[in-house]
Amino acid sequence: MSTAAWGAVLGGTAGGGLVLVVLRVLALRRPQLAVRVLPYLRDVPRRDTGAVPALRSASSSPTTAAAGIFGPLLRSAADMVERVLGGSASVRRRLRRAGRDATVHDFRVEQVLWGVAGFAVVAAIQLLRALTGAVDPVSALLLCVVGFACGVLLRDNRLSSQVREREQAILVEFPTVAELLALSVAAGESPVAALDRVVRRSHGALSEELAAVLARIRTGEPVARAFDGLAATTGLPLVARFSTGIAVAIERGTPLADVLHAQAADVREAGRRQLIESAARKEVAMLAPVVFLVLPVTILFAFFPGVIGLRLATP
């Protein structure tokens, strides 16, 4: 078979694969039949358990699409990553603190996809090196494996970064939300009504956490227990102390507005102290461009004309 025929066969195979992938992705993006029918049947119990069927919306994320196409392979790779790395409790806690509605298995699938991307990048680099010169296949394969491991660890590091960003956003929003709650309670509203008003009027990471607390309260959970749950799941000591203070104030009947004002003042003071500490740490870094860039240029401008003048005056 000639080279042109081999090229036509490979091109047709690649084109057919791309068509199948596109068709599968389009099929996954369409609403599921259960999503269209269950809103009208949500009060019909199941025959086996008697429970009401829950709605499950179709997700169009790249991870879900990839899992739908390469499901068994990705699941087995995710299970292998889980066995090697472990720490599912830590991952679950960080997913909760990052505000992501995903399971540990979904996160492992994302890690596998990031690892495949790292493997592909390193493999492309090695292929370019092979086109320009000789490359050891064993070392190239080891580098590709290292690229896969780097991609997996980079996704884990990215999750930790998302947790830090969300917690920083919560700290920024906290004083304003606490003051709004204090004003609503001082105006005569109950804690639940004040919480509902603040959640409806504000948007952000802390508002999402309080909305989850409000949802648990509306399902029948006691207010103090709902805030205790928020204190147990959050990774911020200030938010945990805020939730514990509200729970104690509700249980013992202490003035809730004073507690909220004190909490907001503590957060503002902590933010002011953190800003001063950050400025003190960056003061040394600010000296680097002054010492190594501005000062040599100033000395050069000051002494260079004199040196030139001495050279011109010296016979």
Image (tube, rainbow, N blue to C red):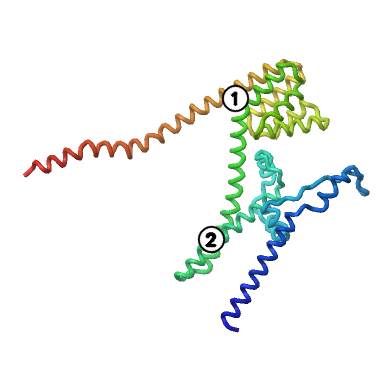
Regarding mark 1 in the picture, which secondary structure is present there? helix
Question: What kind of element bears circle 2?
Answer: helix
Report the residue at 62% width, 44% height from top: 159
Q: What's the amino acid at mark 1?
A: Val
CA gap between label 2 and label 1 equals 46 Å
Left of 22 or right of it: where is 130? left
| Side of 81 where 220 appears, left or right | right
Residue at image location 69% in from the left, 34% down from the top: 208
Q: What residue lies at 69% left-to-right and 46% top-to-bottom?
A: 88
The image quadrant of residue 313 is top left
Q: Where is residue 197 in the image (x, y as percent from the top left)?
A: 72, 26
Residue count near mark 2 (Cα–Cα under 10 Å), binned few <14, some 14–19, many ≥20:
many
With 288 as the anchor, is 78 left or right in this view?
right
Q: Name the residue under label 2.
A: 122
Q: Position of residue 147 (x, y in %)?
A: 55, 58
Near-viewer residue (57 or 282): 57
**Residue 307: x and y, percent?**
16, 40
Q: Quadrant of residue 40?
A: top right
Q: Quadrant of residue 305?
A: top left
What residue is rendered at 62% in x and 25% in y? 176
First reached walking from the N terminus: tag 2 or tag 1: 2
Q: Residue furthest left?
A: 315
Quarter of the picture holding the N terminus: bottom right
Q: What is the number of the mark on residue 267? A: 1
Q: Position of residue 210 (x, y in %)?
A: 71, 31
